[in-house]
Image (cartoon, helix red, strand yellow):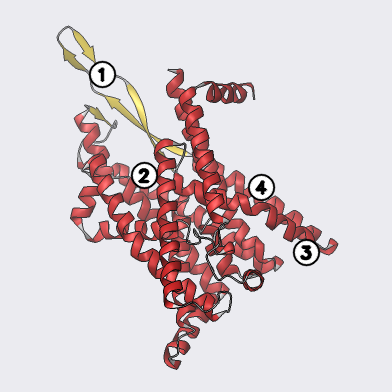
Amino acid sequence: MKDFFNKITLVFQDRTLRKRIFFTLFALILFRVFAAVPISGVDHTRLAQFFAGNEFFGLLNLFSGGGLAQLSIVMLGVGPYITSSIIMQLLTIMSPKLKEMYQEEGEAGRRKFAQWSRILSIPLSIIQAFSFIKLLENQQVLAHLSSLELVTNLLVITAGSVLLMWIGELISEYGIGNGVSLIIFAGIVARLPTTLSQLTFSFEVSQLPLYLVFVAISALVIVGVVIITEAERPIPVTYAKQVRGNKVYGGTSTYLPLRINQAGVIPIIFALSILLFPQMILRFLQSASNAIIQSISSFLLNILANSWFYAIAYFFLVFVFTYFYTAVTFDPDQISTNLQKNGAFIPGVRPGKSTSDHISRILTRLTFVGAIFLGFIAVLPLAMKGVTGITAVSIGGTSLLIVVSVVIDLIKKIDAQVSIREY
């Protein structure tokens, strides 16, 4: 505890760190201000009725950082940017040039990759904004818009999405932590008072055991996420002795840490984005004038709305994306090459391809454990909802997982900054 307070003191004594923290706070406050500014033509009474008990739009609201519930100018949140990032990373599998640019061209390649993701997010924002506006018009949440009003709202919503993407990147560069994750985190935290008040007003004494079980499972989830996120498998590495002039270099031993959950919270975000995007399009098509399109959309929506199908698909996508994101961000061949260049080797393993295969085998086994854990934690709230019947539980479980992971990541980054300044 004493060490914790010493680090807090160091954080606020350091001018650079203090600036980064205040910049992050200012950016998040700015985001919350934008999230409170609605677009034109909103019927707030119908909007509140529309969102009451609607789990699908509750999850969409989670990714918009709370902006969707107000139909604010940033109602899309960072969703289009997340979707464009998923598409770009999927393309790295199909395009060797993209993979080379992302993994081998260093910082310049990653910047170019990020720039393409930003550009792709703009048409995605327009498509999503148009779908939302038409869907909400059909639900009479929005007044019927003229062509000029429709174009104006499309431009405002798209600009809001781009602005939020820019704020997120500014936080990543000039603040502390991952900007996109922190925006989602800020939206979840901002919704906590409303969620707690809803649960309080709907509370019945007969439901007390259910609430106690929910609190106990939430505590176990937090402990499990922390343990799995922090757990790592050390691979011993030895540096060969090198004689240069009259001095001997190397001969030291260290280790290469491989985390069980190398991907963090990203698979959860990716999986939810993939599950929610088709539902949004189908709900829009459900109100089409063509009877065949309506029937197909309704049929597919009924399949997606099935709790068993949704849970299985969610678990599968989280599992797959854990492997996918780990493969994109961690390249055993590159690690093996770097070790060989620096005169390092894993005891008992030949340098080169043997080292790469050895690291891949260990990483595959570790990622399997991490993927199973993430998938289980992702579908656990859905099981809780099936038992308790409380809709907020399923949204709250996803929120809890994201919040814990973001907080752990934030603490690590602050700790790393403090360590640099101590040295």
Residue farthest along the right direction in this orientation = 205
Asked whether the beta carbons under mark 4 and mark 1 sit within 8 Å of each other, the answer is: no
Q: Earlier in the sequence, mark 4 or mark 3?
A: 3
Q: Is residue 247 left or right of residue 8?
A: left
Q: Kindly identify the amino acid type of the residue bearing the numbered disc 1.
A: Gly
Q: Is residue 368 visible?
A: no
- C-alpha distance separating marks 1 and 2: 26 Å
Categorize mark 4 by other alpha carbons within 10 Å: few (<14), some (14-19), many (20+): few
For numbered disc 4, what is the local secondary structure? helix
- C-alpha distance separating marks 2 and 3: 49 Å
Residue beneath label 2, please? Answer: 362
Give the quarter of the image for residue 333.
top left
Q: Earlier in the sequence, mark 2 or mark 3?
A: 3
Residue beneath label 3, please? Answer: 202
User: Quick one: quadrant of the N terminus?
Assistant: top right
Rendered image: mark on residue 250: 1
Asked whether the beta carbons under mark 1 and mark 2 sit within 8 Å of each other, the answer is: no
Percent across and percent down for residue 340 are 21, 32
Percent across and percent down for residue 32 are 56, 50
For numbered disc 2, what is the local secondary structure? helix
